[in-house]
Image (cartoon, rainbow, N blue to C red):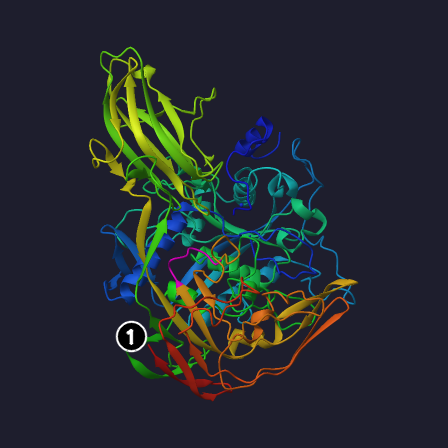
């Protein structure tokens, strides 16, 4: 499910398109979810970015290869890198003691409204009304959100982005931000935040206009373009996507390494304040990625938007609101480092809850008057991905005693134990071929550009068409199956369009669904009579969402009313060249790595917020009022499963499954007196294993009260029953485990300022 509008959406007017190209006038952060909260869309804030998604995929492949012993990392200019797929590189560990520069621009809106979009004027800085603290103890507010405030948020010695990442990484990494003063973009916020138009035509122009407003302010202050360019070079020291393919990530590539825009007003993810749905939803994305291959700095044509005439470009960026807390800023920067959202972006709620920065843990605090101002740490999956996890491994068939330090403050001990599981072989029955036993399949994945190509001789023909039987389920408006012809040996290709079952309209690309039926599709080749040409099917997908894709069978070329060739795919590949298409029987198999990560969560470091930060909106007459309660310290076991690309446990056939899910030691649903579920931001508060009894907790919903008594500790995780930690009565929570007989038992726990646990791990 995709809750976004991306691309040139139907309904956007020519006036808006023109404005988005010219600029000046003449697809975000996890919402704190509770049934009593305002009902805003629970949408992704890490928007589709093929470059970032490819980098993530390479990193996951490299991690799996290293864990399985199939590969070893090597050092390349300070970073630990692994060669993946023969000629690509993944960075597993950043340069030691790395300090990443962040370029931050504070951006307020003008009173000029766009003639097509409309909306209210502004907002400008410091227009967020002061909340009534007798009714609202959740909204972050300051009397003056000035440059000094944001410098503290980014660079303060405590409670800052720099401090959080220094502590989170175990002193391996931190940041240093340069925060501009407020600049003003040409339009009001609705121009850049309206949900009635594609995000590419609203969000991207905001980044362009913000960058250019900053540039113009520098020139107005007396700096030359060359001086501005020299200033910006300090923010370009990292080749994020290894544009030159040399495996050296620690070199400039012409792009700002980390660009963050802070907009005036509230974020839409928190209701949007006075702007409501016209407010910008906090998010991470890549500006003008559609320019990849044609625009960008020399040697790295990866799209983006240039800052004035400096030759320095912005591609990757994040956006946060004026009253965003440290949690939102750290969460969005986590995306900028390549981390995915771990909450359910399809509208549900999973067991990541408040356990990690990359889910609801970004909304923690130790304040009694606001939420979101101090996050909890990441889970072990995220730290492993970033190369920051200190862990020990217990191999298959081994039993080992392991001492773990706190996930927050390990003090020389491992932060986690990794338990590798036998590689999975996954079988998917997609369909039945139209005829015989074989068909062609275009694939089912993000960021595909798969082709099926052959030479066609049309010399002497007076009419020609190519037809095929096709079954398809292709994301409408974003992914397409094309028919294309080349007259120059494949140097360039022309889309020839196609008709489905004799339809009158010729469509450039096939999308949508045939609802499980085989239909006919034909391509008119009369424009190429008298020539020998190449014809290809090309299946292209974007990132974020993909479906089962296109299936082809019984491909026939008809010339002058007679079949020139007919291919039912039974005799093999034949004259076709497959570039990503697969000849198969309708059933596919693949392998996927999976493993457990067990960590000891304690009330130390930023994880002190596990005790003070979890909240519950009480609802009723005080919709902005929260009550606090403690998440339970102890052993938190995560199931990491690369068979899944996200944590959307609410999606079809994915209940109990995800990329990285905490296992709830007590999965039986907690319910109020009317039978309604407590909800999965609160349900897994006692998900930990351990020796201690849990705290008694009392929560409210309107006039209902839920008293949760103290319960005995559960010292052993035992995965012998795949459904032991999952409940069909609350299917989005927790995880169905592997069923391999793994046992992890806590033998000893020493809490305090330097907590330690002793575990027996049987794999």
Q: Which residue is mark 1?
A: 395
- 495, above or below 324, in the image: above
- Residue stretch in magenta: 641-647
Residue 576 occupies quadrant: top left
For the question of whether residue 80 can be seen, the reply is: no
Most common secondary structure along the magenta stretch:
loop
In magenta stretch: residue 2: no
In the rendered view, tell whether residue 1 sits above or below residue 762. above
Can residue 26 be seen by looking at this rendering? yes
- Helix, strand or loop at disc 1? loop
- Asked if the stretch drawn in magenta spans residue 644, the answer is yes
Give percent across and percent down for residue 22: 54, 31
Q: Quadrant of residue 195?
A: top right
Instruction: Say above or below: 503 vs 337.
Output: above
At 53% from the left edge and 86% from the top edge, which residue is drawn? 692
Asked whether, in this view, residue 33 is left or right of residue 215, the answer is: right
Q: Residue 441: image x %, image y %?
A: 33, 40
Q: Is residue 23 left or right of residue 381?
A: right
User: In the figure, is residue 551 to the left or right of 210?
Assistant: left
Answer with left or right where residue 463 lies relative to residue 7.
Answer: left
In the displayed structure, would residue 367 be above or below residue 5? below
Q: Nearer the viewer, residue 168 or 542?
A: 542
Q: Residues within 10 Å of mark 1 (few under 14, many from 20)?
A: some
The image quadrant where one finds the C terminus is bottom left
Q: Position of residue 738 (x, y in %)?
A: 39, 68
Residue with the most extreme front position: 436
Q: Residue 747 or 676: which is nearer the viewer?
A: 676
Q: Position of residue 323 (x, y in %)?
A: 64, 58
Q: Nearer the viewer, residue 413 or 40?
A: 40
């Amino acid at each position: 499910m995709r809750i976004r509008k991306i691309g040139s959406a139907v309904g956007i007017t020519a006036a808006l398109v023109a404005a988005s190209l010219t600029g000046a006038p003449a697809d975000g952060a996890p919402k704190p979810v509770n049934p009593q909260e305002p009902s805003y869309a629970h949408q992704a804030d890490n928007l589709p970015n093929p470059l970032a998604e490819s980098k993530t995929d390479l990193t996951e492949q490299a991690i799996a290869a290293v864990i399985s012993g199939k590969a070893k990392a090597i050092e390349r200019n300070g970073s630990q890198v692994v060669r993946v797929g023969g000629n690509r590189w993944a960075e597993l560990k950043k340069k030691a003691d790395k300090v990443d520069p962040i370029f931050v621009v504070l951006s307020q809106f003008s009173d000029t409204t766009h003639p097509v979009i409309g909306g209210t004027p502004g907002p400008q800085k410091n227009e967020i009304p002061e909340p009534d603290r007798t009714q609202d103890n959740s909204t972050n507010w300051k009397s003056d959100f000035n440059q000094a405030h944001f410098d503290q948020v980014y660079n303060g010695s405590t409670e800052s982005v720099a401090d959080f990442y220094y502590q989170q990484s175990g002193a391996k990494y931190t940041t240093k931000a340069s925060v501009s003063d407020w600049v003003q973009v040409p339009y009001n916020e609705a121009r850049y935040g309206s949900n009635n138009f594609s995000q590419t035509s609203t969000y991207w122009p905001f980044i362009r206009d913000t960058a250019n407003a900053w540039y113009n302010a520098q020139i107005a202050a007396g700096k030359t373009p060359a001086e501005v360019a020299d200033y910006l070079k300090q923010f370009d020291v990292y080749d994020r996507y290894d544009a030159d393919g040399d495996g050296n990530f620690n070199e400039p590539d012409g792009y700002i390494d980390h660009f963050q825009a802070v907009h005036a007003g509230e974020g839409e993810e928190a209701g949007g304040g006075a702007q409501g749905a016209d407010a910008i939803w906090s998010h991470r994305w890549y500006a003008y990625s559609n320019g990849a291959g044609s625009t960008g700095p020399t040697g790295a044509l990866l799209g983006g938007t240039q800052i004035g005439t400096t030759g320095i470009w912005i591609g990757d960026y994040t956006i946060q609101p004026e009253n965003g807390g440290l949690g939102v800023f750290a969460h969005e920067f986590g995306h900028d480092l390549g981390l995915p959202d771990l909450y359910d972006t399809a509208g549900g709620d999973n067991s990541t809850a408040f356990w990690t920065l990359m889910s609801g843990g970004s909304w923690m605090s130790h304040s009694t008057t606001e939420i979101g101002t101090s996050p909890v740490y990441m889970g072990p999956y995220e730290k492993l991905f970033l190369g920051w996890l200190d862990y020990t491994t217990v191999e298959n068939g081994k039993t080992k005693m392991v001492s773990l330090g706190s996930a927050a403050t390990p003090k020389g001990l491992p932060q986690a134990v990794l338990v590798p599981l036998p590689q999975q072989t996954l079988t998917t029955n997609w369909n039945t071929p139209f005829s015989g036993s074989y068909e062609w399949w275009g694939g089912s994945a993000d960021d595909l550009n798969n082709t099926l190509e052959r030479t066609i001789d049309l010399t002497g023909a007076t009419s020609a068409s190519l037809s095929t039987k096709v079954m398809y389920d292709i994301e409408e408006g974003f992914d397409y199956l094309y028919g294309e012809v080349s007259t120059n040996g494949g140097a360039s290709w022309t889309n020839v369009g196609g008709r489905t079952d004799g339809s009158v309209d010729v469509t450039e690309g096939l999308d949508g669904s045939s609802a499980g039926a085989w239909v006919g599709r034909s391509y008119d080749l009369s424009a190429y009579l008298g020539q020998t040409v190449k014809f290809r099917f090309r299946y292209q997908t974007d990132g974020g969402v993909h479906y089962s894709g296109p299936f082809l069978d019984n491909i026939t070329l008809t010339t002058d009313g007679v079949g020139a060739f007919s291919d039912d795919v039974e005799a093999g590949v034949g004259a076709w060249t497959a570039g990503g298409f697969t000849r198969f029987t309708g059933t596919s198999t693949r392998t996927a790595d999976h493993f457990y990560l067990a960590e000891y969560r304690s009330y130390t470091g930023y994880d002190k917020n596990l005790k003070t930060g979890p909240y519950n909106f009480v609802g009723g007459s005080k919709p902005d009022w929260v009550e606090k309660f403690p998440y339970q310290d102890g052993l938190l076991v995560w199931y990491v499963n690369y068979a899944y690309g996200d944590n959307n446990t609410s999606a079809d056939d994915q209940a109990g499954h995800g990329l990285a899910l905490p296992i709830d030691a007590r999965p039986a649903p907690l319910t109020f007196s009317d039978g309604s579920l407590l909800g999965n931001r609160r349900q897994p508060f006692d998900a930990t294993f351990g020796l201690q009894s849990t705290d008694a907790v009392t929560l409210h919903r309107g006039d209902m009260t839920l008293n949760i008594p103290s319960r005995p500790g559960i010292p052993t995780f035992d995965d012998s029953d795949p459904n032991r930690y999952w409940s069909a009565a609350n299917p989005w929570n927790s995880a169905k485990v592997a069923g391999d007989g793994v046992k992890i038992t806590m033998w000893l726990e020493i809490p305090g300022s330097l907590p330690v646990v002793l575990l027996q791990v049987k794999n």
